[in-house]
Amino acid sequence: MQLIAKNHRFVAKAGTAIARPVKESFTDSLISVTTVASAPHPERKSVLIDANALFLADIPGTATQLETTFRLPYAYDARSSGFVDVRSTDDLTAFNVTAHYNIPKLPAPPLTPPPTPTPKPPSNLEDNRSMFSVITTHRRKLPEKNRWSHASWTAASGISWASNGTTDDLAPFPRHYIINRWRLEKKDPNAAMSEPVQPITYWLDKNIPTNIAPRWRRVSFEWNKAFEKIGFKNAIQTKTAGRQRRVRQQRYAPCVSTLVR
C-alpha cells in the first residue's frame, strides 16, 4: 500500500487531445509505502497494514527544514520514533507520532571566523544532537459529495482569496486560480432560515491559553451574522481539538508494530 500525494497543479479538460500527455508528463509523489498484512475481510473487504512503515516517516520534510535553519544535517530517526496514540471515529483516524531527529556529531567550531556567518545550533535543547517533534496525521473518509461547491469561481488577480492554482497550457492564460468554497446546504431547503447540514467547523488547539480561546470564538461567531443574511443559522462553529473519543490507543513503543484496519 502506498501513500501518494496527487499532483493537481497541471490539468487538462477530459477527452481532449492534450489530456493524456498531461497525465503522463506530470507525476504524483510517493510519500511512504507499507505491506499488506492480511487477506481482505470476507464482509468489509478491509485489510490490515503495518502502520509503522506508513506513518513513521518524515512526511512533512522536517529534516530539510532543520538543515535549512541550522545548516546541520539532522536526519529522521525511525527506530527512535513511535506512536503516541491513535484515535478513530466513523470517518476519521488521527495518528499522533513522536518523530525523532538527530545528528551523529556536531561539527567542531572553526578556529577562525568563517568568511560567511553560519547559524548557531539550537539553543533550547539539552543535547543539540537530538530533538523530538510531534506530528499529527489525519486520514478521513472521502465524502459522497465534494466538500467544495461544484460551482467554481475564478479568483481575480490581486485579490486575497483562499484558492487553488492550476496550469492549463492550452488556455489563453495558462495559470488560473479557483476560489475554495464550502458546501453549505440547508437542513430544511424550504425554510427562510435553517441550520446547515454540515457547518463550517474550526478546530482550536487545546494549548491556546484560556483567556485567548474565547476571543477566537467570538470573532468566528461574528461571521454567522453574514451567513444569516443568506439564510443560514449557526453556519460557523468552533471546537477544541484533542477531545475526541479514543477508540484505540497505543502508548509510545517504537519497537511494536501497529496494525490499523
Image (cartoon, rainbow, N blue to C red):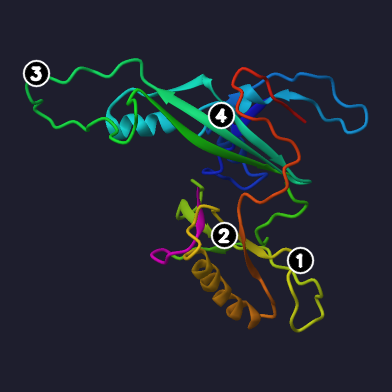
Judged from this view, the residue extending furthest toward the left is 112
- Give the Cα separation between the discs numbered 3 and 2: 54 Å
Span colored in magenta: 157-166
Q: For this rendering, which residue is in front, 14 or 85? A: 85
Q: Quadrant of the C terminus?
A: top right
Contact check, label 4 and label 3, Cβ < 8 Å: no
Which residue has dot 3 on it?
Answer: 111
Of the image marks 3 and 2, the number of the one nearer the N terminus: 3
Which of the two discs, 3 and 2, sits closer to the camera? 3
Which secondary structure class fits the magenta region best? loop
Q: Is residue 136 above or below residue 192?
A: above
- Give the Cα separation between the discs numbered 2 and 4: 25 Å
Contact check, label 3 and label 2, Cβ < 8 Å: no
Is 97 within the magenta?
Answer: no
| Quarter residue 258 falls in | top right
Which class describes the residues within 10 Å of circle 4: few (<14), some (14-19), or many (20+)? Answer: some
Which residue has dot 2 on it?
Answer: 180
Residue pictured at 82% horizontal, 80% vertical: 190
Task: Name the amino acid type tagged 2.
Answer: Asn
Judged from this view, the residue extending furthest toward the right is 43
- Give the Cα separation between the discs numbered 4 and 3: 41 Å
Which residue has dot 4 on it?
Answer: 31
Which residue has dot 1 on it?
Answer: 197
38 relative position to 164: left or right: right
Residue pictured at 59% horizontal, 21% vertical: 254
Q: Position of residue 95 (x, y in %)?
A: 63, 36
